[in-house]
Amino acid sequence: MSPEIALPILIPLMAGAVSLVFWRSRLMQRLIAVGATAGLLITTLWLLASVNREGILVMQMGGWAAPFGISLVADLLGAIMVVLTGIIGFSVAVYSLATTGRGHEAYGYFPLMHLLLAGVAGAFLTGDIFNLYVWFEVMLVASFALLILGSEKAQMEGAIKYVALNLLSSVIFLIAVGLLYGMVGTLNMADIARRLAMVEDQGMVDALAMMFMVAFGIKAGAFPLFFWLPASYHTPPVAVSALFAGLLTKVGVYALFRVFTLIFHHSPGYTHEILLWGAGLTMLTGVLGAAAQFEFRRILSFHIVSQIGYMILGLALFTPLAVIGGVFYIMHHIIVKTNLFLVSGIIHRLRGSYQLKQLGGFYRSHPWLAVLFLIPALSLAGIPPLSGFLAKFIVIRAGIEAEAYGVTAIALLVGLLTLYSMIKIWSEVFWKSVPPEGDVDPYPEVRQRELWLMAAPVAGLALCTLFIGLYPAPIYALAEASAAQLLDPQGYIRAVLGAQTEMVP
């Protein structure tokens, strides 16, 4: 029994429930938000340390042995992802103290945030394919409610696209789960992997693999059904945008890594070739969309799409080095992308706009903010010695070793175009002079305390980026060990079902 597996799910669920009890107390909701996300971060670090020390940990809910009961499973990839969830949750909670207004809090901002974090953590830790669907739906409900807070026209337009495509993904996912259950008679992912290898109709297995690929690809924001993401992520309050940017699409990426290393790994020549093409097109379309934008958050939203392509590329190549690169890239990107959205929120608070043409002069007026922008921006573009350089280097080297020269060339081109987008933001927001209509600051009442609350999580995430770039050895070791577990599905099966279970060669 490993109780630390359940805590990353229970803490945000309980925090959300207690926040509802203190619905009328703004102070209590804020204290609960910061305290609960800090507790989430501490327990996820405990879980990661336990998994790193003891191996894959399993908790059988209700005392029912797998595959008859529901299993919570924490391997290194799942533990890494919940740690990142804790980091982002705590950072956004602190940031929200300065940016979330009374109106949004009155409509349940903090309880919804806790519910979203619980859904994300549940998706990372479940060992049951149907419960993965359930946690996806928990996330969808919470994220939709957060997306429409404020009920502005742009929010509602973005929310319609967001919900429509995600509901389509959910329908495909649920149908695939039903067909899979009809084929193998189990919902436990370890048991599915064990039984699926004995199915004679491999054509049906490949068809199911494609259904899961489409469902998770939509949720990850991959080509071609990614347009819901840049249409919606720039519309809600900036703290919500940052939370979405850091976590939501990565749950889809995690699901792709999980099912295509554990369950559908028998025909990599077929499924992973499609993933390879999808990765290249995702990178290219995302970065070209970003190059055409001149609104801060829309640029960053399109870059979420392009960077998802690098992560999928690591899975598609399916070599040990490529999977290491994919996992490393996920860790780097969650921190960097969240930070860039938080920086955009500070700029909006100071100048009242996300439009690049209406901004300027921040290098002179707020040099500290310029530095806090440059660290994640140059990391996103892959400039050494920051974290993005090593992440891109590993994936690109894996592509060259696998002789996937076409998609590797695309990855290099996308890196250059990403640098172009970051230079565009730097030039327009920080370097050029303040435009005439921006001479008068529309937010002179911004208090120093609020700026400190916004800047503190940005600085913390920037330090994480610097640490990963300057001292990559421990992070690389985690990614390497995680990749080894992913490429050894029998180890996962033994951990969940027990050593006495008959293994399939």
Image (cartoon, rainbow, N blue to C red):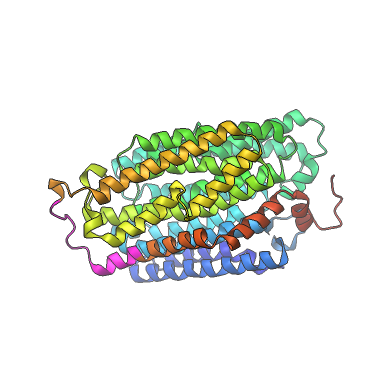
Whether residue 159 is visible to the viewer of this picture, yes or no, is no
- The residue under the point 67% across, 33% down is 271
As rendered, which of 413 and 69 lies closer to the eye? 413
Residue 81 picture location, percent across and down: 57, 56
- The residue under the point 74% across, 54% down is 492
Q: Report if residue 450 lies within the magenta region.
A: yes
Residue 155 picture location, percent across and down: 34, 43
- How many numbered badges does the structure rendering display? 0
Q: In which quadrant will I find the C terminus?
A: top right
As rendered, which of 146 and 202 lies closer to the eye? 202
In the image, taking residue 401 as reference, residue 391 lies left or right, namely left
In the image, taking residue 339 as reference, residue 71 lies left or right, namely right
Residue 28 picture location, percent across and down: 38, 71
Whether residue 5 is visible to the viewer of this picture, yes or no, is yes
Q: Is residue 120 above or below residue 218?
A: below
Question: What segment carries the magenta color?
Answer: 439-455
- The residue under the point 65% across, 47% down is 321
Q: Is residue 56 above or below residue 341?
A: below
As rendered, which of 98 and 427 lies closer to the eye? 427
Residue 27 picture location, percent across and down: 34, 71
Splitting the image into 4 quarters, where does residue 23 fall? Answer: bottom left
Q: Report if residue 424 lies within the magenta region.
A: no
Q: Is residue 421 above or below residue 95?
A: above
Splitting the image into 4 quarters, where does residue 234 fall? Answer: top left
Q: In which quadrant will I find the N terminus?
A: bottom right
